[in-house]
Amino acid sequence: MKKVTVISIVLILFSLMVFAGSYQLRPGDVIGVSVYGHPELSGQYTIGPDGHAQIIPIGDIGIGGLTIQEVTSIVTSKMQAFVSQPQVTVSIQSYAPFLVYVLGSVKNPGAIQMTGPQAKLSEVFALSGGTFSDANLRNVEIITPSGTSMTVNFYDFMTGKSIVDPIVDVGDVIIVPSLKQDGIFVMGGVQTPGFVQYTPNTSILDIFKNTGGFNQNADLRNVIVFYKGQTTGQTINLSGIYQGEVPSLKIEPGMVFLIPVFSMQYVTILGAVKNPGTYNLPPSNSESLAEVLGLAGGLLNWNEGKVSVISQTQSATYNISPQTLAAVNVKPGDVIYVPKVPNDYVTVIGAVRTPGTYELTSPNPQPLTKVLGVAGGLLDWNLGQIEIIAGTQTTAYQVSPQTLATLNVYPGEVVYVPTTLSMKVYVFGDVNNPGVYQFSPNMKALEAILTAGGPTVAGDMSNVYLFKGGPNNYPQVLNLSKDGIPTNNILISPGDILYVPQSGLYNLMQIVNNVTSLFNLADSGIYLWKSIVPTTPYSTSTVTAQGAGR
């Protein structure tokens, strides 16, 4: 018995030594670089989300996915430009925490944060509160992010029949089946991953409705599905199934759905662009500044002529020119900020016919009547009140001919006309004037879209999404094209939302997220309509200065 124990310990120590040399660095790891005889060149460095680190004095180096030996070789080679025959030592100072996911017959299923290069299955179970008495520990399934699956016998380790405590790694999914029942397991990019009870009538819609819907960064076109007993999953286009583009999927007990997520393949664009927000980068993972700004609809006229690119480790500001925009590259995780020229525009939102931001022709204050006139005038469902927001100060006024004639609006201010809270419908997407509109009795879907100016050239009227009663309800798809079925032009109700998608864009998750965001902004009273939904250029409307100060 003693001989077996010594051999076991030797094998374990040997495997740890082998692993230390083969470990591939990942974002969040901290490495130490030591150059013998040159303490000024030594230091600790954190690997960024893009797998790069800024190592003094070398600069930016991509080291994610490399071993310590490989990094040592690269750093030594590059350090020769600064030191003669450098003696470089690279070591791991700390490991980035990582997530694994536990489903099934455990007390606290979900994401578990681990530390270290890898984790043992016993540690994962301990952090998940332990297993239930009905857990089938002889058939624990481990699914890797690449889609491979293996079944391990954890029961033998618990009972001392085996010394092997299975190893789990970054992003692994551990499924502990029950001896009592079969279910469906969902993991990854959903709101509440976990176990879904199976019945003969369970549909795909039922499965993901019970998991709270999808996360914003879920990749629905590359979902991995395992049927019970399979060791290799199949990739399906879940978005295509929802849209009827591909055949539906047979639902069986014991299935596993793994919803991948986009990780750090995005950039955030803020400031004087038409559609500020966060955008996924194309697969090349590196785009020119001109191409990235194009994702946000391009620059507005009131930019300062500069653009800043802010990365994880540094930032740089450039003068805007065609040559610069084409030459500067943007990487995943970067933030692009285009400063706005102050005090040359006013914003009008709320119960006006054409809410938006309007460019001024001079820095002088503008009469409130003229500002409201450029925005199309007041709707008859305003609350009889107007708020003028200047910085952090808000002043409210009652709507009257005298007030409208005497008040002035200063550049940079926001005019907000509060709306009634009922008898309105929402029309978003590719229509000419997206916004909130007054509901009228017997209003039909097509009438509401025409009230919003009708579809744009890119709007697809054959796939209009109707959210009955708000964004939390599953949408109904209407065919309102001229060749569509007449019965699709159905009656709508107050509080309904209509969304006209861009032709060819049918990502249901993205549409639901867009509608939810626009609805929340609209009801909050701070919905900058034309800043969110591109319809017409900003510079088409101006306000001519006249009148005295307020």
Image: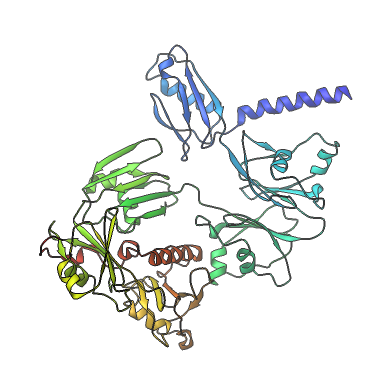
Instruction: Between residue 394 and residue 130, name the one nearer to us.
Output: 394
Instruction: Identify the residue at horizontal 25%, vertical 64% (top origin).
Output: 537
281 with respect to 404 (left or right)? right
- The part of the image, by quadrant, that contains residue 366 is bottom left
Number of numbered discs visible in the structure rendering: 0
Image quadrant where residue 377 sits: bottom left
The picture places residue 548, in percent across and down from the top left corner, at 10, 62
- Quarter of the picture containing the N terminus is top right
Relative placement, left or right, of 251 versus 335 is right
Q: Quadrant of the C terminus?
A: bottom left
Task: Give above or below for 539 relative to 456.
Answer: above
Q: Position of residue 247 (x, y in %)?
A: 60, 70
Q: Is residue 210 above or below residue 33?
A: below
Where does residue 155 sit, x and y in percent of width and height? 82, 43
Q: Residue furthest right?
A: 1
The answer to whether residue 418 shows anywhere in this view is yes
Q: Position of residue 335 (x, y in %)?
A: 37, 46
Query: Most extreme residue toward the top, as rendered?
Result: 37
Rendered residue at 57%/68% (across/down): 241
Residue lying at 67% horizontally and 25% vertically, measured from the top left: 17
In the rendered image, the vertical position of residue 58 relative to residue 204, given as above or below: above
Name the colouring of the figure. Answer: rainbow
Q: Tell me if I can see residue 245 in this picture.
A: no
Q: Nearer the viewer, residue 447 or 139?
A: 447
